Image: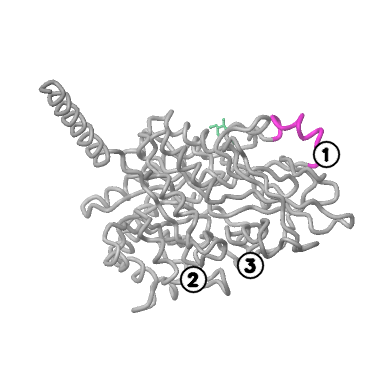
């Protein structure tokens, strides 16, 4: 009798110790971050792609950081500037202030202003012949000071919590492919080895960029403001980022580890655009794992790395010569997929646009251009999904899409967890299904990522 009681109390005691431990672990376990990009040009889209502040709000409970995109720089003056003054700054109703004011409602949210992001594009006749103004700024010490002062002023004036530098470095040049599938396989290693020179002054620019980040950090430090950087897709970090030198200036790094294949860059060959792991016969750097390992190898703390996850797909048109298996890489494709009905953008489908093309109740019996695509999932969860519809006999209605969905995005969050990385950077809220058109759920990709990061 006595013995049973003793046993019982021992067990109870053990149980309570264990319960205490578990509770403790939950408190002290690593906090993974969810960084949400908000491209403010989505505010001025037409139709179902238009995202206004009321549409943005349901996302904010899930985001630790909101990165407002994008500010730019002014050629010659080297000032940091709004790219759309009416939208961003207009007295009383400008989005800069509207968005930073959301912090009152979501007190844990940090809002950063991002500069560059491939959105600072000059148009007009002679724009193409001009040198890259982002490199010109780096080369000019007075320009750097000008930039630092003006970006600091923007952040302070409008109440941002810091700056994200998404510097528009020259990108790797995509390789042209003019051949049948057989020779593509043989030629892959050579074709994608990245042998052409991206920037002859890369060494210099790398050093100057380190100086720029140092100066921005020094300006932000007295106010405890945050500094992050975004490595844009197809920017070769080893050319422009001196990781050990810059990492101490940065609160975190967002890796644009997607768009390795896009219809714009690769108009004649379709392939997985954002795999987690290396695929055989492909460029070994065109995947998340290789990008992450580059930063880790150069002594970046894992906790500062956020893996970029897109909320969209990349569509190509299949021709009658592309075959009917859909198996990537797919040759003889064209950069002529129909424009998405909501976003009205060329070469990109938001998640709800992809979702509408997959088999569902609305298209079950549809034919031709409305017929559902074949969805090919990746049971190994390494490379992502694709969906396709082979071209018909006339060569019409063919389409091939590499895309992200809530499941594949969650797989990437799983990768972040198992490698103890800092978190996920989602590109961007406006391409997620913010209206709940697909399954009624608003922001399904964001939710799936959040769920996997924290459970
Ligand atoms: C990036 O640059 C390094 C040299 O610094 C080179 O070895 C590598 O192939 C480049 N990667 C790509 C994808 O071009």
Q: Position of residue 102 (x, y in %)?
A: 32, 67
Quadrant in which residue 214 is drawn: top left
Residue 426, compared with residue 421, is above or below; it is: below
Residue 415: give x, y in percent of width and height: 47, 37
How far is disc 3 from disc 1 in space, using C-alphas? 32 Å
Q: Residue at x 30, y 48 (%)?
A: 217
Residue named by callout 3: 344
Give SS at disc 3: loop
Q: Which residues are magenta?
A: 178-191
- Extreme residue in the front direction: 1
Q: Is residue 184 magenta?
A: yes
Q: Which residue is mark 2?
A: 43
User: Considering the numbered disc 2 on the image, is that residue within a helix, a strand or a loop?
Assistant: helix
List the residue tagged with mark 1.
180
User: In which quadrant is the N terminus drawn?
Assistant: top left
Give the vertical position of 133 relative to 98 (above or below): above
Looking at the picture, how far across and down is residue 446, in whole percent? 46, 54
Residue 382 shown in magenta = no
Task: Of the two numbered discs 2 and 1 on the same chain, state the one appearing first in sequence.
Answer: 2
């Amino acid at each position: 009798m006595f013995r049973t009681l003793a046993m019982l109390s021992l067990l109870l005691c053990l149980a309570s110790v264990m319960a205490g431990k578990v509770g403790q672990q939950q408190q002290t376990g690593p906090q993974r971050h969810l960084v949400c990009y908000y491209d403010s040009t989505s505010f001025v889209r037409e139709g179902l792609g238009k995202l206004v502040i009321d549409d943005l709000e349901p996302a904010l409970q899930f985001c630790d950081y909101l990165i407002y995109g994008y500010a730019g720089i002014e050629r010659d003056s080297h000032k940091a500037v709004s790219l759309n003054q009416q939208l961003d700054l207009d007295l009383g109703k400008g989005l800069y202030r509207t968005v930073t004011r959301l912090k009152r409602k979501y007190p844990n949210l940090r809002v950063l202003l991002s500069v560059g992001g491939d959105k600072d594009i000059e148009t007009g006749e002679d724009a193409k012949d001009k040198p890259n103004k982002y490199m010109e700024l780096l080369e000019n010490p007075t320009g750097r000071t000008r930039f630092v002062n003006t970006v600091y002023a923007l952040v302070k004036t409008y109440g941002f919590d810091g700056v994200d530098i998404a510097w528009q470095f020259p990108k790797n040049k995509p390789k042209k492919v003019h051949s049948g599938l057989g020779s593509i396989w043989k030629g892959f290693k050579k074709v994608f080895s990245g042998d052409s020179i991206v920037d002859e002054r890369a060494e210099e620019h790398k050093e100057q960029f380190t100086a720029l980040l140092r100066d921005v950090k020094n300006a932000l430090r007295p106010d405890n403001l945050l500094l992050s950087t975004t490595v844009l897709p197809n920017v070769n970090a080893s050319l422009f980022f001196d990781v050990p030198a810059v990492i101490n200036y940065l609160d975190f790094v967002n890796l644009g580890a997607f768009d390795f294949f896009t219809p714009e860059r690769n108009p004649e060959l379709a392939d997985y655009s954002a795999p987690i792991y290396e695929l055989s016969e492909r460029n070994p750097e065109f995947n998340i794992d290789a990008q992450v390992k580059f930063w880790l190898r150069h002594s970046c703390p894992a906790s500062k790395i956020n893996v970029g996850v897109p909320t969209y797909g990349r569509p190509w048109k299949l021709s009658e010569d592309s075959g009917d298996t859909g198996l990537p890489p797919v040759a003889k494709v064209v950069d002529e997929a129909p424009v998405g009905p909501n976003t009205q953008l060329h070469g990109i489908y938001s998640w709800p646009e992809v979702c509408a093309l997959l088999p569902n109740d609305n298209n079950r019996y549809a034919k031709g251009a409305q017929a559902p695509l074949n969805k090919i999932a990746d049971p190994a969860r390494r490379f992502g999904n694709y969906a396709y519809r082979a071209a018909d006999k006339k060569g019409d209605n063919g389409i091939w899409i590499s895309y992200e969905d809530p499941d594949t995005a969650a797989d990437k969050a799983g990768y972040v967890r198992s490698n103890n990385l800092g978190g996920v950077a989602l590109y961007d809220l406006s391409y997620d299904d913010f209206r709940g058109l697909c399954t009624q759920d608003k922001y399904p990709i964001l939710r799936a990522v959040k769920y996997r990061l924290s459970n």
